[in-house]
Image (cartoon, rainbow, N blue to C red):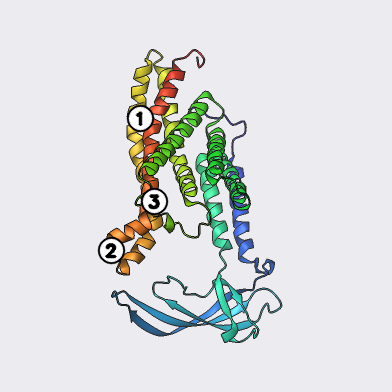
Amino acid sequence: MTRIKPKVQIKWLTILIILIVGVVAILFTHYDAPLYQQTVAQVEQVHNYGKTNTTDEFQNRDYQENQKLTLKILNGKDAGKTVKAQNQFSGSTATDQEYHPGQQIFVHLGSQKLKASSIMITGFKRDTTVIFLIWLTITFLLIILKFRGSMALLSLVVNALLFMVAIELDVHTNFNPFILFAILSIIFTMVTALLIFGKSKETVVAIVATILGTFSAILIAYLVLSVTHQRGMKFEMMDYVTQQRLPLFFAGSMIGSLGAIMDLSADITSSLFAVNREEPTLTFWQLFEDARKIGRSIMGPLINVLFLIFVAGTFPMMVLFLKNGNSWGYSYSMIMSLGIVQSLISGIGIALTVPITGLIAGAICKTKVIK
């Protein structure tokens, strides 16, 4: 696919500046406790005691242990003071956390500020870690991809802002969530394709093929669920949903499959246009067959990536259900059934995108408009 030819290349001096800015940002977040209204403390000393082994009715073994923490207050009226606090954690750390010297945490001092019994730990102060990961991602993208990396970052920021706007509209209006996120998906596709792949005829083909492939898959899924009356679908497992679950389910399926479908359509389109430039005598059906071959080599890994991402998201809950005496069938129906259906919808979209892209790209390659 024809790419944007940048007028300004990212120089190594720019990369060095970004590295320095990142280091400064990390150091700043490490010492920014005075900017927080919530009390921040640093763990100075830790004493662990009272370890107790536990075994439940399903023979799951764990242990609980107590901690005496010496904390130094870093902000507020009590900045600089040293206080004691109590903490209890388990070996699994499922709902609690073990603390170590040097960590910064949020605390609630209570009415009797300097007494250990009134101090409640509310969690880690994670801004330094978050900033470090963001900086590392940006640095790698700019060092490895340079201009294209900056376009990828820009598309990510723009899409994140658009997603936040869509969420706000969904929360504060009665607009149909499926229509809202369908419009958002189209905007996502156009913004990402134009920023990353550039302004070209190949980009237009990729955008059209992505939209058609995605919405074709959603339409098929809707027809199947309508015919089967949604039997076996555990929509009640969509926790804390206060809207109609089916539109949100389809909206999530649509957005979840969009990236993989766009990647597939862009790869097929760029390859077909390159082949057509090298062999302009190829017929439409020869180009279409090339699209099928390219699609067969790409769609397998893409479907597996989507499935593995889904498995990674449900793995902790599956282990929890199985360890608490539930059968595989019950655990699957409660935890994985909706995600599996979404993975199948994505797979259908990926499969449909191959011929759709081949037809559109092959037809345009053989018209005089492109030449």
Q: Position of residue 63 (x, y in %)?
A: 37, 79
Give the alpha-carbon distance from disc 3 to disc 1, as whole Å.
Answer: 27 Å
Q: Is residue 149 above or below residue 91?
A: above
Q: Position of residue 107 (x, y in %)?
A: 59, 75
Q: Earlier in the sequence, mark 3 or mark 2?
A: 2
Judge from the rendering whether residue 193 lies leftward or rightward of residue 80; answer left or right: left
Residue that numbered label 1 is attached to = 294
Q: What is the residue that sits farthest to the right in this orientation?
A: 77
Give the alpha-carbon distance from disc 3 to disc 2, as whole Å.
Answer: 18 Å
Say which of 250 and 356 sits in front.
Answer: 250
Amino acid type at circle 1 is: Ile
Give the alpha-carbon distance from disc 2 to disc 1, as whole Å.
Answer: 41 Å
Q: Position of residue 198 (x, y in %)?
A: 55, 30
Judge from the rendering whether residue 286 lies leftward or rightward of residue 19; answer left or right: left
Residue that numbered label 2 is attached to = 327
Task: Tell me the residue at 52%/27% (across/down).
Answer: 204
Marks 3 and 1: which is nearer the front? 3
Amino acid type at circle 3 is: Gly
Q: Circle 2 — which element?
A: loop
Residue that numbered label 3 is attached to = 339
Say which of 55 and 253 sits in front.
Answer: 253
